[in-house]
Image (cartoon, rainbow, N blue to C red):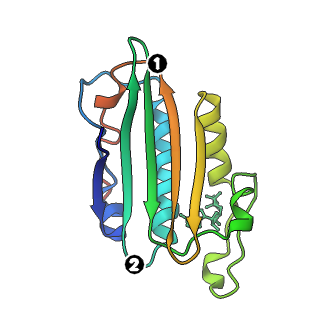
Amino acid sequence: ASPARRTCRPRRMLSRGTFFAPAQDQRPPRHLGRLRQVIVNLVGNAIKFTDQGEVVIEVVEESRSADEIMLHFAVRDTGIGIPTEDQSRIFDKFATVEYRDNPRLTPSTGIGLAFCKLAIEAHDGRIGVASEMGEGTRFWVRLPLAEPSVAGHRLSSKPAA
Ligand code: ADP
């Protein structure tokens, strides 16, 4: 399946704050609230650490059985990247990266990604990151969803002001 995509300039994307997974039907999945928070965290980070280029959300339904959908989604950006030595600890609580060249980016609590990992793993999913300094970052999530109708739900219905 090809990914469902919205490509926007980061600021525009922030002001829209909405995307759709491929439509099937309208029944909401059980864990939608937390999935939405994970996406908001990942997109927020992508926008924060990307000055130019793009932030793209990819959504792919990897497989589907009678009672489960395997959803794969990713948030990828063309931002500053995460140093290789930090990538393995970036999901730890309070883990932050020090940007000596850009102190404006350093203040951070390091809670967002720890929350994402907890939320995804609590629902038998997996989360990971691939990043190249100066090229960008791609956070991916694989998440089994029990309700076959999840792919059609609108993940956020309210455009941001
Ligand atoms: P916080 O909750 O403080 O935003 P996170 O846990 O979300 O912290 O992120 C921790 C750190 O991971 C950030 O301070 C940043 O250094 C790095 N990081 C997260 N997402 C990205 C990204 N898309 N590009 C570059 N660095 C990132």
Up/down of 57 relative to 32, above or below: below
Report the side of 45 relative to 4 (left or right). right
Among the 4 quarters of the image, the one containing residue 72: top left
Mark number for residue 146? 1
Res. 34 visible in picture:
no
User: Height in image: 49 above or below 13?
Assistant: below
Q: Secondary structure at mark 2?
A: loop
* Residue 151 makes an appearance in the image: yes
User: Where residue 116 appears, x then y in whole percent?
Assistant: 60, 45
Classify mark 2 as within 8 Å of ligand 1 or not, answering yes or no. Answer: no
* Total numbered circles: 2
Q: Amino acid at mark 1?
A: Ala
Q: Quadrant of ligand 1?
A: bottom right
In the image, taking residue 75 as reference, residue 83 lies left or right, namely right
Residue type at mark 2 is: Gln
* Residue name at image x 67 percent, y 80 percent: 99
Left or right: 141 with respect to 17? Answer: right
Quadrant position of the N terminus in the picture: top left
Residue, disc 2: 52
What's the CA distance linking mark 2 and mark 1?
37 Å
Figure quadrant of the C terminus: bottom left
What residue appears at the point 45 percent right and 65 percent down from the top-left corner?
77
Q: Position of residue 84 (x, y in %)?
A: 69, 67
Residue furthest out toward the front:
1
Q: Earlier in the sequence, mark 2 or mark 1?
A: 2
Element carrying mark 1: loop
Residue 118 at x, y percent in the picture: 66, 39
Point 37% across, 39% down: residue: 60
* Location of residue 36 in the rendering, given as x and y in whole percent from the top left corner: 45, 41
Q: Quadrant of residue 6?
A: bottom left
- Camera-side residue of 35 and 85: 85
